[in-house]
């Protein structure tokens, strides 16, 4: 029997959850750090002892001062391998575990909010903040790099070929989208751990640990083709999209791997939460 006026679909509105998560200190600190990183890198390039704008090297770091987009590509390459994954793990791993840690999870369910709805609302908010975190670094890097080094055509790392900036800009949007997709594995594992423990640090650390282990195994050449199924193997495939003749095959494989892992892990998260004893 349902109480008069009770509508499960109106419990825990997304607007309320977005505001709750935004007001948390860890959200503001993380976004502040991500927004500040490109400016810190600009200062390091400008005042570093090896400031050699226009150097002969063709590594992505050597070309960072060639222009705003080159600098943004460098900033994304140095942050995507760890910092962005930590941010995603934080937003997705802290969301449910923190409620359990504060003993407020039982009161949310007693409201009553259906378990699947509570989990879905929190997942939507966590993924939205994660996507925003992944976007902040390259967008801010384009701004910082353009102000510091100008808006120039893009030189391709490795070959030195030059591509018009207006042609690269749409590809850069695809690169940012791909970075979001590859982080789905970290997000889904962090979310699964978040519904399984009342320790936010454990959920975040477990997801980050996956990245570390996968990166180590990725360097073991004896694994051969099995390395392609590691969740981090295709993370740098976006560099092929910035070539004069873009190659998206690696990004397609990376997307397939990430979406598959994420679907399985999120399915386990919902199954685990439906059976979870929240008062234990």
Image: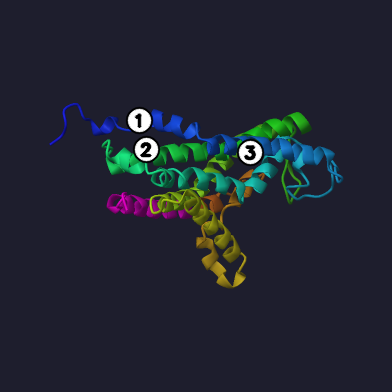
Q: Do the residues labelled 3 and 1 touch (CB within 8 Å)?
A: no
**Numbered range of the magenta stretch:** 256-280
Q: Do the residues labelled 1 and 2 touch (CB within 8 Å)?
A: yes
Q: What element carries label 2?
A: helix
**In the rendered view of the protein, which quadrant contains the N terminus?**
top left
Q: Is residue 150 magenta?
A: no
Q: Name the residue under label 2.
A: 121
Q: In which quarter of the image is residue 20?
A: top left
Position of 108 relative to 189 (above/below): above
Name the residue furthest bottom.
Answer: 222
Q: Earlier in the sequence, mark 3 or mark 2?
A: 3
Q: Mark 3 points at which residue?
A: 33
Q: Quadrant of residue 104?
A: top left
CA gap between label 3 and label 2 equals 26 Å
Say whether residue 202 is visible: yes
Q: What residue do we see at 53% from left, 41% from top? A: 177
Check disc 2: other Cα within 10 Å, few if <14, some if 14-19, many if 20+. Answer: some
Q: Is mark 1 on a helix, strand or loop?
A: loop
Say whether residue 253 is visible: no
Q: Give the total of numbered labels.
A: 3
CA gap between label 3 and label 1 equals 29 Å
Q: What residue do we see at 50% from left, 51% from top? A: 201
Q: Name the residue under label 1.
A: 13
């Amino acid at each position: 029997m349902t109480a008069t006026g009770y509508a499960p679909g109106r419990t825990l509105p997304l607007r309320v959850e977005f505001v709750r998560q935004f007001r948390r200190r860890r959200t503001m600190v993380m976004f502040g750090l991500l927004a500040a990183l490109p400016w810190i890198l600009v200062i390091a390039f400008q005042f570093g002892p090896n400031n050699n704008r226009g150097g002969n090297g063709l590594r992505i770091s050597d070309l960072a001062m060639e222009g705003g987009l080159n600098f943004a590509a460098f900033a994304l390459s140095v942050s995507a391998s760890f910092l962005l994954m930590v941010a995603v793990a934080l937003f997705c791993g802290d969301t449910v575990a923190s409620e359990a840690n504060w003993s407020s999870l039982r009161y949310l369910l007693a409201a009553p909010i259906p378990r699947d709805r509570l989990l879905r609302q929190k997942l939507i908010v966590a993924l939205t903040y994660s996507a925003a975190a992944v976007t902040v670094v390259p967008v801010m890097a384009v701004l910082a790099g353009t102000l510091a080094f100008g808006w120039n055509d893009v030189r391709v790392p490795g070959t030195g070929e030059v591509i018009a900036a207006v042609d690269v800009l749409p590809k850069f949007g695809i690169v940012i989208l791909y970075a979001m997709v590859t982080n789905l594995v970290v997000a889904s594992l962090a979310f699964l751990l978040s519904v399984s423990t009342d320790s936010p640090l454990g959920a975040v650390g477990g997801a980050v640990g996956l990245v570390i282990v996968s990166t180590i195994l990725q360097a073991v050449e004896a694994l051969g083709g099995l390395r392609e199924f590691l969740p981090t193997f295709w993370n740098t495939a976006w560099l092929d999209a910035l070539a004069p003749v873009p190659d998206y095959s690696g990004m397609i494989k990376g997307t397939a791997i990430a979406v598959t892992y994420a679907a399985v892990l999120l399915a386990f998260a919902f199954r685990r939460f439906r059976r979870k004893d929240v008062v234990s």
